[in-house]
Image (cartoon, rainbow, N blue to C red):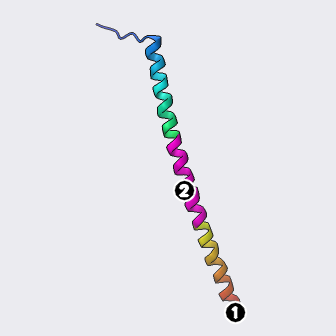
Amino acid sequence: MSYFISTPKMQSEALKSARQKFQSVESEALKSSELLKGKLEGLKEKVQGVIDETGKTELR
């Protein structure tokens, strides 16, 4: 039976790789979050506009 022995250098490289992957995923999540936030803000403005217009027509 053979065993795989990892060296500190291998562990360090694996840790660097994991950090890079995490930062990449985190960056993409932030971009998606900002995009969603912008779209929701636009939707909020449109809904508020419709509500305002509806209020005006009911008062006439």
Circle number at residue 2: none
Which disc number belongs to residue 60?
A: 1
Q: Position of residue 56 (x, y in %)?
A: 68, 85
From mark 1 to mark 2, how far is it between C-alphas?
37 Å
Left or right, 16 with reference to 37: left
Residue 10 falls within the magenta-colored stretch: no
Element type at mark 1: loop
Quickly name the residue at label 2: 36
User: Identity of the amino acid at label 1?
Assistant: Arg
Q: Earlier in the sequence, mark 1 or mark 2?
A: 2
Magenta part of the chain: 27-42
- Given the image, on which type of amino acid does mark 2 rest? Leu
Q: Which corner quadrant holds the N terminus?
A: top left
Q: Position of residue 21 (x, y in %)?
A: 46, 33
Would residue 21 appear left or right of 49 to someone viewing this image? left
Residue pictured at 45% horizontal, 27% vertical: 17
Residue for point 64% across, 77% down: 51
